[in-house]
Amino acid sequence: MFSPQTLDQVRAASDIVDVIGGALPLKRAGANFVTLCPFHKEKSPSFNVNPSKQIFHCFGCHKGGDVFTFVREYEGLTFSEAVIRLAERARIPLEIDNSPGAQQAKSVKDRLLKLHEAICVRWQQCLENEAGGQIARDYLAKRGVGADAIKEFRIGAAPEAWDDTVNWAKSKGFDAALCEQAGLVLKKAETGHYYDRFRGRLMFPICDEQGRVIAFSGRILQGDEKSAKYVNSPETPLFTKGRVLFALDKAKRAVLDAGHAVVCEGQLDTIACHAAGIRNVVAPQGTALTSDHARILKRYVEEVVLCFDGDKAGRAASIRSFEGLLGSGLAIRVATIPPPDDPDSWIRQHGAESFRAILGKAEGYFDFYLRHLCAENDITTDRGRLAVLAGMGMDLAKTGNAVLQDTYAQKTSQRLGVSVDAVRTEFRKIRPATPRPEAAPRPAATPSAAPATSKPAPQSGPPDGHYPDEPWPDESDAAPSVAAEPPPKPSSNEVWLLKYLLLSPELSHFAATHLEPAWVTHPTIRRIAAVHFSMGTDIPGLLGEFEGDDFARQLIAESALEQRTIPDPEKQLADVILRLRNQAYDQRIMALVSQLGDASLPHAERVAALQEQQHLRAAKRQPLQPLGDV
């Protein structure tokens, strides 16, 4: 086994265009390269190599992957042999991770996979044959879930008992501690006895992209109102909910064929779509779409259609998902279902073709968002028009795309009945939520010059992506005497950052030693933090530094007066800083995607941008580190 750092280093040093171009005659076709596929006979080229994503894909035989996949398939090698071949090509010394810890981790994952497969079969049998599955069978019949869908998605039922899984595991020889690690059972602290996590629930297996069961989602069928509607497996060595999409293992081919992925909210919506023949549909696992979800989808398609519930909560979910998709470079459309329906109920009442028509009419995200803002605000008033301008301007600024900004300046002006020049002026006032170019991490050093170690190889900047060239603003510039324009609304992460800063000196010190200035994009919160790091937690003194800036004083006062008890505040603060860091990296990655889309970009700059992309993606996988740590 190779360490993840070694694989990242070899991948970054092996530009896929250079590797495939050494074996096949590539021709430029827009932003991609094409050639005749070496894996099947064809007369016209359908084999595409995408330099910005560092992948290849044949639209004829559907074979595709990264540079390791190509070398493995083309030369008939094993994965290890392909890694060695590419490492030798890049002159990178290899370090194979044969440590006892790595071997033990692999053993645990293998045992967890066997356990998940076995309990999945047990719950399938309960649903199909046992009296304890009758309520679940009745519920599925009521929801119109047929036998084929039940079989394909391996739906099961967990009996209404506290010890069914405990006793089943014991009879099958599965260790109770392993079941606890899998999240199938819980231990009672007082007695040390185990009991079932999933009781009296309809069970949906969650699979990885290879179709292996790695977790479960259980829907309650009866019980008191205090019980959660859905209970999901906790995160385990197999399962991280922000990195898994329900039904992707079944939707992959359909997603490729359709050219876009449809994202629904829940399992039953997704199953209803698949049963109706609309198979390019997936769903997140009880969370908003994350940047990891977007990265996974980007491997298959360039476009995502969000299709959540038709109510206000569904519209809000679509807006929240924009943040996760933003840095991926994916095109985003939104399909709106008339409330109060969701995809499942609409298909049952109106049929598959009617639902296809809704998907076909899906509008661009910013068309949807403009319509939403105009519906939520009274645009006949100054306050309503300002709210629409602020909302559109802030999200458009995040894209960093001048064409989008100008297009929707025109559309916004038409909806509000104001001049397009006035809208453009207001949009320009909103600062893009991206790191300054000079503060962004620089491209990685040439990997072949770096020794292979157990830690990430040092890059041409700190490996955790610090922005050493951008200091906190001078205290003398911290508080403008007059607020010249309505300030933009800070993100929830930035609001919570300020609350933690003012909570205690210990938290303030933690933030000062872990937070880079460029990660805080809201100008007012950034100025407050700069003054605070130099003054401490004297709230009156801090307020005094912002005389004349009512918005800053309001933020300080509201944050300092936070009344809720915050459990484990240092961990919560670390999570906030980590999210701010990753958002900054996502914005830079998005800018690189745009840069790599320029067909005229010189080769050296393209390689540097690709290496920087790899560096940023690797940095996002690292935990939060103190500034200056290597």
Image (cartoon, helix red, strand yellow):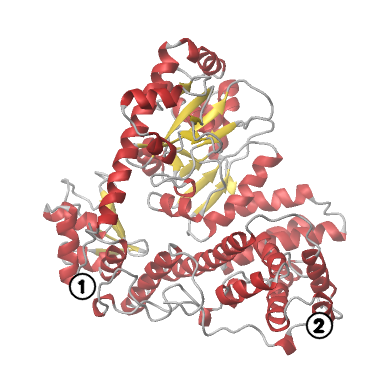
Structural crowding at the residue carrying mark 1, measured as other residues with C-alpha within 10 Å and reported as few (<14), some (14–19) or many (≥20) = many
Place of residue 95 in the rendered image (x, y in percent of width and height, measured from the top left): 21, 67
Structural crowding at the residue carrying mark 2, measured as other residues with C-alpha within 10 Å and reported as few (<14), some (14–19) or many (≥20) = many
Q: Quadrant of the N terminus?
A: bottom left
Query: Is residue 351 shown to the viewer in this render?
Result: yes
Tag 2 secondary structure? loop
Residue at 59%, 23% in the rendered image: 350
* Image position of 172 with respect to 504: above or below: above
- State the image quarter where residue 16 is shown: bottom left
Place of residue 228 in the rendered image (x, y in percent of width and height, measured from the top left): 62, 32
Whether residue 363 sits left or right of residue 204 in the image: it is right
Q: Quadrant of the C terminus?
A: bottom left
Residue at 73%, 52% in the rendered image: 373
Tag 1 secondary structure? loop
Q: Which mark is residue 216?
A: none
Place of residue 608 in the rendered image (x, y in percent of width and height, measured from the top left): 36, 76
Tell me if label 2 and label 1 are in contact, CB under 8 Å. no
* Image position of 111 with respect to 498: above or below: above
* Image position of 564 with respect to 317: above or below: below
Q: Which residue is mark 2?
A: 545
**Residue reaching furthest to the left:** 76
As measured in the structure, the alpha-carbon distance from the residue carrying label 2 to the one carrying label 1 is 54 Å
Name the amino acid, label 2: Glu
* Image position of 68 with respect to 277: above or below: below
Q: Which residue is mark 1?
A: 92
Whether residue 581 sits left or right of residue 374 in the image: it is left
Name the amino acid, label 1: Ile
Q: Earlier in the sequence, mark 2 or mark 1?
A: 1
Q: Nearer the viewer, mark 2 or mark 1?
A: 2
Residue at 80%, 75% in the rendered image: 539
Number of marks drawn = 2
